[in-house]
Image (spheres, coloured by chain):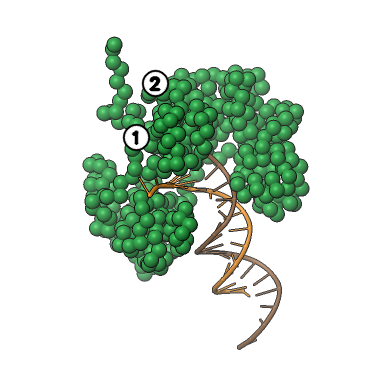
Chain colours: A green, B orange, C brown
DNA sequence: TCTGGGGTCCTTTAGCAT
DNA sequence: TCTGATGCTAAAGGACCC
């Protein structure tokens, strides 16, 4: 049996752990730049704050209803996530960490009653040790465990936060209940198409013809259908190396100036280089893209990217910047107001297995130089050593007006308990 | 004024070789 | 040498996830 464990309103719950005054209060957490809502407590959901809502459009509601607003604090959430996942790992060796707040677990050798007790103990243990509430869904396939998890969340009173799809009747009942759009793997486009056909519930989706599903929703859709029918097509995935690393940002305003854009692209590239070196990889392809503001209907929209093959695998920021700049000049068009840009490195290879090209050789001095720069930046703070292409004044600071403290990872921020 | 970021997998298409 | 069929690969874009 697969179990999907999901932390309830994870980011909001993290903020609550160290600030008990927030219990039962509506909370929202904002994306980078305090742009849009990416997490809501149940109370905030009840007040009608939608997922992905632009923060500036909801400021009045936040004030009116006394909704507590937080900038995202990834140091805190990452650390809390690791604590939760560690505990889950003590209850079964077969665990796939699917995202910051979700894991698939696999349980074998339990009878149904034994498993239920085991899961109850696991839930209690996580909540007691970390303060993060979780929901658990159990079923014979991953996709059905997602469905079961949804039921456990939707009916907390009746399920106690744990729901198991054990019988055929339970499976059918769940599918009759689940709206098409809430199926894991069905996004907005597929939803539109399926609803246009008059389908409303997951059950109707499973009654479609296999060939039709294959044709219109690819093998991914077909796998999904099989999974909902109870046939396992997905299995637990162990740790896999990243296939690409991205650094992308929206700008605070729109910019036309090539020198500004160049500075941004160089900075993104340097961050990609740091990430590559941290996981001891080199890349062989670098992709650079530019985009105008997609919300600005008055201006012409522009979106262009280009990928460049490198003559040798590298993680030297100096080399990467050289190629990124070349790529940028091919896609930059004067007169466009740019709002977002990014750099993605791919075709990653292990640093140890670097293949040397015959004629175009990397400068051997780069490797020790990068090592020293990384050490300095680690010891003395992120921006101790910069490259000439980067903006030395660091004027592109993110908006983070509602940031909480790093309670669990920074000694200065540790929580204080005062006697009254 | 103010709308995120980081991933995966799949399909389509164009270019090239056989 | 030309042509059409076929097959491979890589880039680009679209769908999805959290």
Q: Position of residue A235 (x, y in %)?
A: 61, 39
Q: Position of residue A326 (x, y in %)?
A: 36, 66
Same chain shared by disc 2 and disc 1: yes
| Residue A362's disc number | none
Comes first in the chain, label 2 or label 1: 2
> Residue A3 or A225: which is nearer the viewer?
A225
Q: Are marks 2 and 1 in contact (CB under 8 Å)?
A: no
- Assign the C terminus of chain A to one quadrant of the image: top left
Q: Secondary structure at mark 1?
A: loop
Residue sitting at 50 percent across and 24 percent down? Answer: A133
| Residue matched to label 1 | A403
Residue sitting at 27 percent across and 58 percent down? Answer: A389
| Residue A21's disc number | 2
State the image quarter where residue A61 is shown.
Answer: top left
Visible residue check, residue A289: no
Q: Is residue A72 above or below residue B9?
A: above
> Residue A4 or A2: which is nearer the viewer?
A4
Q: Position of residue A26 (x, y in %)?
A: 46, 27
What chain is tagged by disc 2?
A
A382 lies left or right of A289: left
Spatial CA distance of label 2 from label 1 is 16 Å
Q: Is residue A3 above or below residue A338?
A: above
Q: Position of residue C11 (x, y in %)?
A: 50, 64
Q: Which residue is outermost to the top?
A: A420
A344 lies left or right of A393: right
Q: Secondary structure at mark 2?
A: helix
Visible residue check, residue A396: yes
- Assign the N terminus of chain A to one quadrant of the image: top right
State the image quarter where residue A312 is shown.
Answer: bottom left
A212 lies left or right of A249: right
Label 1 Cα neighbours within 10 Å, binned few <14 / some 14-19 / many ≥20: some
Q: Is residue A293 above or below residue A179?
A: below
């Amino acid at each position: 049996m697969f179990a999907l464990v999901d932390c309830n309103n994870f980011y909001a719950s993290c903020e609550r752990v160290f600030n008990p005054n927030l219990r039962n209060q509506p909370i929202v957490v904002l994306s980078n730049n305090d742009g849009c809502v990416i997490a809501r407590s149940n109370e905030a959901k009840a007040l009608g704050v939608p997922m992905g809502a632009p923060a500036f459009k909801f400021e009045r509601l936040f004030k009116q209803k006394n909704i507590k607003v937080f900038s995202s604090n990834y140091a805190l959430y990452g650390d809390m996530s690791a604590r939760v996942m560690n505990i889950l790992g003590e209850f079964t060796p077969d665990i796939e960490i699917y995202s910051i707040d979700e894991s698939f677990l696999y349980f074998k050798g339990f009878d149904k009653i034994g498993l239920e007790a085991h899961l109850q103990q696991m839930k209690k243990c996580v909540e007691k040790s970390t303060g993060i509430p979780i929901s658990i869904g159990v079923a014979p396939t991953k996709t059905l465990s997602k469905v079961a998890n949804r039921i456990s969340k939707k009916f907390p009173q009746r399920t106690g936060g744990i729901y198991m799809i054990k019988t055929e009747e339970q499976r059918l009942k769940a599918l009759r209940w689940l709206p098409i759009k809430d199926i894991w793997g069905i996004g907005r486009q597929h939803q539109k198409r399926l609803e246009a056909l008059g389908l409303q519930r997951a059950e109707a989706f499973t009654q479609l013809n296999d060939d039709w599903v294959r044709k219109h929703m690819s093998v991914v859709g077909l796998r999904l259908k099989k999974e909902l029918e109870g046939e396992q097509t997905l299995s637990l995935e162990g740790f896999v190396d990243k296939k690409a690393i991205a650094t992308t940002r929206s700008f605070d305003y729109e910019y036309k100036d090539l020198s500004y854009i160049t500075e941004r692209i160089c900075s993104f590239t340097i961050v990609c280089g740091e990430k590559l070196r941290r996981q001891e990889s080199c890349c062989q392809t670098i992709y650079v893209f530019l985009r105008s503001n997609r919300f600005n209907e008055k201006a012409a929209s522009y979106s262009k990217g280009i990928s460049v093959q490198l003559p040798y695998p590298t993680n030297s920021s100096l080399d990467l910047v050289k190629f990124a700049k070349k790529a940028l000049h091919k896609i930059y068009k004067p007169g466009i107001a740019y709002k977002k840009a990014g750099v993605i490195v791919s075709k990653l290879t292990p640093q140890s297995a670097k293949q040397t090209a015959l004629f175009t050789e990397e400068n051997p001095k780069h490797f020790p130089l990068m090592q020293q720069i990384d050490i300095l930046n680690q010891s003395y703070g992120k921006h101790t050593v910069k490259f000439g292409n980067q903006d030395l004044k660091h004027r592109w600071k993110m908006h983070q007006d509602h940031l909480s403290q790093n309670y669990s990872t920074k000694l200065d921020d540790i929580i204080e308990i005062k006697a009254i």
